[in-house]
């Protein structure tokens, strides 16, 4: 690898490590987890200049909203409910439509919408899988029943075939006996003449 690719890899590692959140300390495992509440800044407050903090610039608020939404998405407390992050991202898009974070905020919103769509479709798909499994089991049972009937018909056929062969052999013997009797009858008639 050349020097440029090493620099690019190093910069990617630095950026990823800068974005990583430190592990949350576990205070008490017996406590119930608390849900993170989204912070939504009303539109009226954002249009007026920021008087709350001298050091905070207006441009940083959109970044902070985006980071807050990402923390809400990554929070283990909100694994199944992403409504707080969704509201935060929607407020970021509504309040700061020209921000450099709008494209980055739109992507997780699409993912959350797709996830919600998949969650809605999951019970339908599970019902379909259950129905298919039931149909499969019923088909397997019918198949076993047909195999059993086929086996019984085969046994009956073999028994009938054996009986017919015995009757055929008996008829052959009777026919041969009849021919012998006819021959003897012809001889007797010739002798009697």
Image: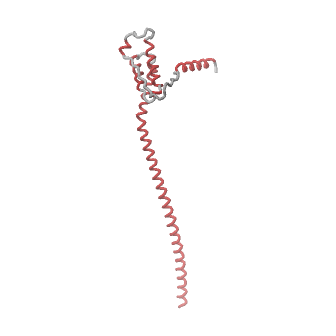
Residue pictured at 47% horizontal, 25% vertical: 75
Q: Is residue 91 above or below residue 185?
A: above
- Residue 16 at x, y = what percent? 54, 21
Q: Residue furthest left?
A: 44
Frontmost residue, 179 versus 88: 88
Residue pictured at 44% horizontal, 22% vertical: 69
Q: Is residue 152 above or below residue 129?
A: below
- Residue 50 at x, y = what percent? 40, 10
Does residue 155 appear in this view?
yes
Q: Residue furthest top?
A: 54
- Residue 133 at x, y = what percent? 45, 45
Frontmost residue, 57 versus 159: 57
Instruction: Residue 7: name its quadrant.
Output: top right
Residue pictured at 54% horizontal, 78% vertical: 176
Q: Is residue 78 above or below residue 49?
A: below
Q: Quadrant of the N terminus?
A: top right
- Residue 127 at x, y = what percent? 42, 41
In this picture, residue 22 sits left or right of residue 127: right
Q: Is residue 136 above or below residue 10?
A: below
Instruction: Residue 183: name its quadrant.
Output: bottom right
Residue pictured at 44% horizontal, 11% vertical: 57
Does residue 114 appear in this view?
no
Instruction: Residue 11: name its quadrant.
Output: top right
Number of callouts: 0
Figure colour scheme: secondary structure
């Amino acid at each position: 690898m050349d020097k440029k690719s090493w620099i690019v890899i190093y910069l990617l590692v630095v950026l990823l490590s800068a974005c990583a959140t430190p592990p949350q300390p576990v205070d008490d495992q017996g406590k119930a987890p608390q849900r993170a509440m989204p912070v939504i800044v009303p539109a009226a407050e954002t249009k007026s200049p920021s008087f709350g903090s001298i050091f905070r610039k207006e441009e940083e608020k959109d970044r902070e909203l985006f980071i807050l939404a990402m923390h809400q998405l990554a929070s283990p407390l909100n694994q199944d409910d992403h409504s707080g992050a969704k509201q935060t991202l929607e407020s970021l898009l509504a309040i700061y439509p020209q921000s450099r974070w709008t494209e980055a905020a739109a992507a997780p919103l699409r993912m959350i919408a797709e996830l919600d769509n998949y969650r809605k479709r999951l019970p339908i798909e599970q019902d379909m899988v259950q129905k298919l499994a039931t149909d499969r089991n019923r088909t397997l049972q019918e198949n076993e029943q047909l195999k059993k009937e086929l086996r019984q018909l085969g046994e009956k056929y073999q028994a009938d075939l054996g009986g017919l062969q015995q009757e055929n052999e008996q008829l052959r013997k009777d026919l041969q006996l009849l021919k012998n009797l006819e021959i003897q009858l012809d001889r007797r008639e010739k002798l009697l003449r």
